Image (cartoon, helix red, strand yellow):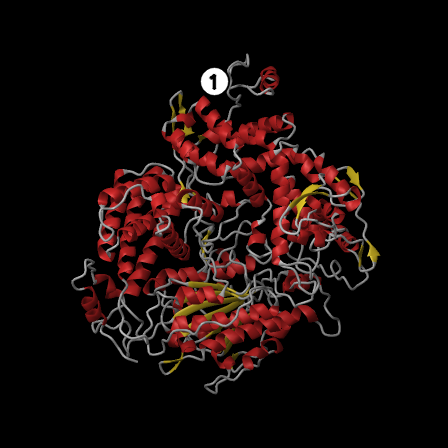
Amino acid sequence: MRNTDFTWMRVFCIGGFVLAGLTGCDGSDASSPAVEVDAGPVALRRLTAEQFTRSIHDTLGEHITVPSRIDPDDRRDGLFAVGSSFASVTPSGFEKYEAAASAVAEQALDAAHRDDLVPCQPQSLTSSDEECARAFVEQAGRRLFRRSLTTEEADARVAIAAEAANTLNDFYAGLELALISVLTSPEFLFRVEVAEPDPTDPSRMRLTSVSMASRLSYLLWNTTPDDDLMAAAENGDLVTENGLAEQVERLLSSPKLETGIRSIFSDLYDFKQFDEGLVRKDNALFPVYTQTLAEEAKEQTLRTIVAHLTEDKDYRELFTTPESFLTRRLGVAYRVPVPTANGWEPYVFAEDARRDGLLSHISFNALYSHPGRSSATLRGKFVREVLLCQDIPTPPANIDFSIVEDTMGELRTARERLEAHVTNDACAGCHTLTDPIGLALESFDAIGMLRDEENGVPIDTSGDLDGAAYEDAAGLGRALRDHPALGPCLVRSLYRYAAGREVQSGEQALLEFLNERFAESEYRVRELMREVVLSDGFRTTSGPRDAEEAGDES
Amino acid sequence: MKRFDRRTLLRGTLAGGAVSMGLPFLDCFVNDNGTALAQGAPLPVRFGAWMWGCGMNPDRWNPTTEGLGYELPIELQALDRELPTGAKLREHVSILSDFDVKLDGRPNFPHTAGLMGTLTGSLPLQDYTVPAPTLDTIIAAQIGGQTRFRSLEMSCTGNPNQSYSFERQGVFNAPEISPMALYTRVFGPEFADPNAGPFTPDPRLMLRQSVLSAVKADRDRLHQRVGTHDQQRLDQYFTSVRQLEQQIDILLAGPPDLESCSKAPTPGAESLGTEVGQSMSTNRLMADLISFALACDQTRVFSMMFSDRISGLRQPGSSSLHHQLTHDEAIDSALGYQPEATEFVFVSMEAWADFVERLAAIPEGDGTLLDNCLVFGHSDISFAKIHGITGIPMMIAGSAGGALKPGVHVKGNTSPTTRVGLTIQRAMGLNTESFGTRSMEATQPVSEIVA
């Protein structure tokens, strides 16, 4: 038992909470204490582009160049992980999946790699061999469907292999076509989550052991289950306390957890925009900024997060830490010397460098800016919505902005211009929430380089965050670290990411419980991940999601 | 151009092979003579949507005179171009002004309400949501099945994640952002070039059909294991699988049999982004490619996003985007408009003229490809500074194969924009009784432009 368990359970038992499942109030032999949870529904989850690529690499070979041109991921409620449980496949999307499958199958079964995947030698290279084809289809199919194929599913693919081998006079070409039919099946492109009645309480629906394997693997590693997890899944281990705990410990202590953490934060912060070249800046105004710099800026932040969290440091300290990683190219933009000529080095910013915490990184400041200028509003909105989980309403339709951003007029700084909003009632409601935060970051320009003046006027970075006053960006970082909503917001975001949907009312008590646990662990994210996957929120469900009502009046 | 009897060819090539194929599926596009679209048969009519973001200045964009030969206002001067046929571009473009999006008390979500009202006929209850299918997908559902591609979507914004071609919320057709990628998709190795000698169907095409059959067989098993929400999503998935089967059927049938069809040349160098020069260049390259694709009947439905509704167009070296300028820039008291923001209106209308002009450059039948097109040019709002949704700027280029009268200016007298959507659907051969909901419900087409 982990050393925090006992203390926690005493608190909860005294507080009169109902503990469900196997946990007793004496704290003995409990795998994980639980609160009453009415978990929400499950739905098919379309593999994100990243999961599609990783799943193919992990099942068919790292050497494969997976086409990047597939149907774009759908971002919903601020997460691709949520959009994936709503996304379908359009005709043009399916066309791309089929083309990608074809390219993947050809590489997977090329002469240099086919022996890694095909567990037998065909009787003839120029015709069909059903037995060998079946062995391949069953093995590759199980890994790609994340479960064993049914007889019908395998038969259909073996028949394709035979037809194609005999038409093209090529056994391996036959396997290629069979593999394409696996890769274009909804059983591969969607993660199918299936529930069953819990034998100890048939009124409750739990995820099947096989469904749990994919849930765990895509959450913690963002890829398909490995052989060990698949074996545990098919053995029924993942619906037992011990079997689940054992696999969870293995997944959490694996280096692959870094991928999982990276994917979570990349999704939450919308960093995919860097990969797609969508964070563009004006060349004339920002000659230092290039696509390579942008990608390295993203990488810097993700490396910082991964190192910090896998060392089990306090999540909140991410917003104050001067520790990071740099390349020489980034060093130019940060105006600090970087000895390593090629690649990355750990770097601790000096005390007077004004680079404390993630919010001082180039990545955020460039992403939440316009191509030609910084945006205090976008930055403040990001902090409120993504880091603190607070809603910012959309602006009213009919407003006169002309005073606000006329940089050539009388109002020379963003502060002066934005203060004009706050004098207007229609604007004040939102801008008093976003602007004080964003104005503290005005010392970073549209690509995150330091500046002291705007249009010749000194920039005033002081402000307050819900009562905590600060003088500059570093002070904002400290105020954010101490903000009571920071930890609970990560809990909520991680839960939504794990479940692939919004939090349901029956899950509120669980979230409060997770908040307390997270605080007690001193905000260690690995602990939070463990609590989430062992909770009934992750392991049970109300059943399949019902159809959405047809849009509006149509 | 040499013609081939496809039936004979298919028989000849496939006879004796291990693969057999049934011909009945060809009935939908092969006439009794075995030619796909023989001379004398009516030429296909195509629909396209072309949008630009952030509207215009109503006093400077709306023509002051109505009917044929309307007076060209300052912001529409781009339509004054002379075509190779000797006609002016404006003679092919109708202007539809003073048609409104009506909120019925719903919020005017900036840049969303006007766009969705016009394209779907309904107003969203939440921001960033799509209340009903967009016009292009409504039309594609009716006529898209007859061509290799149900529809083609394009964007000049460099963003692969944004189009306004929605089947419904969450199901959108992602755009091609790279002209080279569009070229490869349409005119790559799969394209059967009518000028490239005898046609031999690739046996792999038929094997791909077998692959798709196996995928379809997974359907029923999966349907039983999921809820009603997922069943809907799977229905969409399998509609897409069927679409690809049809696409392969059409590839198997051989090269298109259209006088004007030839393979597009490889597009020139591309530079993706939202600087004015980049978007203008992408627009021209895409226009070129889509004109060849339409002439070869590879699709009959397309859409183009020239700039997003929150327009990210910008001039190099400027710290402001088009959208920002529409809100931030003061109205020059001497001029009566925002000079910098207005430059982007001119840019957008030049781009629109570039696009339409390209369609008029391909001869087809007795006229040009444009005559057999209906291209709906529109923005998301009228006066961007206040997110105006009255008098949404709309244009129709082409005559839809004779269904429409081109070159007319019609004032809508505040009737809903859906009247234009209704007119378009009927011109495209749909039996649409009404389009839109509540105050946006339209039953009266714009008779002034109906031939």
Left or right for A286, reference A90: right
Closer to the camera in the image, A112 or B23: A112
Residue A311 placement: quadrant: top right
Tell me if residue B396 comes above or below residue B139 in the rendering. below
Image: A92 above or below B374: above
Q: Is residue B436 left or right of residue B97?
A: left
Asked if one can make out residue B75 in the rendered structure from this viewpoint, the answer is yes
Please tell me in which quadrant of the rendered image residue B327 appears.
Answer: bottom right
Q: Residue A291 at what x, y percent from top left?
A: 61, 57
Give the labeled residue for mark 1. Answer: A22
- B173 vs B137, nearest the viewer: B173
Task: Assign the N terminus of chain A to one quadrant of the image.
Answer: top right
Q: Chain of mark 1?
A: A
**Numbered circles on residues, count:** 1
Which residue is nearer to you in this view: A377 or A33? Answer: A33
Q: Position of residue A326 (x, y in %)?
A: 67, 47
Which residue corresponds to the image point at 57% horizontal and 38% vertical from the top-left? A493
Say few, some or many: other residues with alpha carbon within 10 Å of mark 1 (under 14 / 14 to 19 / 20 or more).
some
Instruction: Say which residue appears at 28% left-offset and 42% top-offset.
Output: A120
Name the amino acid, label 1.
Leu
Does residue B429 sit above or below A158 in this rendering?
Answer: below
Residue occupying the far top of the picture: A26
Q: Residue furthest bottom?
A: B86
Q: Position of residue B294 (x, y in %)?
A: 39, 71
At x 58%, y 31%, the residue is: A526
Q: Is residue A78 visible?
A: no
Q: Residue at x 46, y 73 (%)?
A: B288
A168 sits left or right of A184 in the view: left
